Amino acid sequence: MSKVLIVSESPIFRSCVSLVLSRKVETTIAGETASMEEALRLARRRTCDFIVVSADTFCRRERGRLQTFKLDALRLLKQVCPEVAVLALEGSGSGSCASILVEAGADGYLAAKSDPDELSTAIKFITKGGRYISSGLMLNGNDPPAFCHNQSQPG
């Protein structure tokens, strides 16, 4: 059973994800935090083995342009605690941050339009060592990635 840390500046996001996880996924909620810095501290203490983070923590559209933030924190987390899985959940939009976050080290990306059951599927898939990208999303304008859940299941 995964120990999940939920990371988002939005208390509503954290509460909603916690509620979905408690109803749909066999996990223990290890905690919630608003910052990647705190998430890194908790991961170093082995408080969690899985992080669900709002994609808005790292990138969002402002004035029509995609802006990125705190990607170094994600890279550092994966460098210092490579065993901790990271799933980014899109708050809104079309998946424009998916490529950026996967390249920075996220193990998966779930689109805003996903059914809540897909969160369970993504966590199980990533826990088995796979990478998970919501079906229908494309990375860098290409076809869906080879590690998309519906193309390749880990053993």
Image (cartoon, helix red, strand yellow):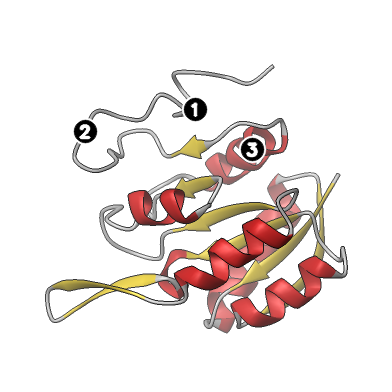
* Residue labelled with disc 1: 149
Left or right, residue 116 beside residue 95: right
Q: Which amino acid does label 3 sit on?
A: Ile
Q: What residue type is labelled 1?
A: His
Location of residue 106 with respect to 44 vertically, above or below: above
Left or right, residue 54 beside residue 91: right
Location of residue 12 with respect to 110 vertically, above or below: below
Query: Circle 3 sits in a helix, a strand or a loop, which is it?
Result: helix
Q: Tell which circle, 2 or 1, labels the residue nearer the N-terminal end.
A: 2
**Label 1 Cα neighbours within 10 Å, binned few <14 / some 14-19 / many ≥20:** many
Task: Using the rendered view, name the quadrant where residue 148 is placed.
Answer: top left
Residue 46 x/y as whole percent: 87, 63
Residue 12 x/y as whole percent: 55, 78
Residue ID at (78%, 66%): 43
Q: Tell which circle, 2 or 3, labels the residue nearer the N-terminal end.
A: 3
Task: Using the rendered view, name the quadrant where residue 11 is placed.
Answer: bottom right
Viewer-nearest residue: 30 or 105: 105
**Label 3 Cα neighbours within 10 Å, binned few <14 / some 14-19 / many ≥20:** many
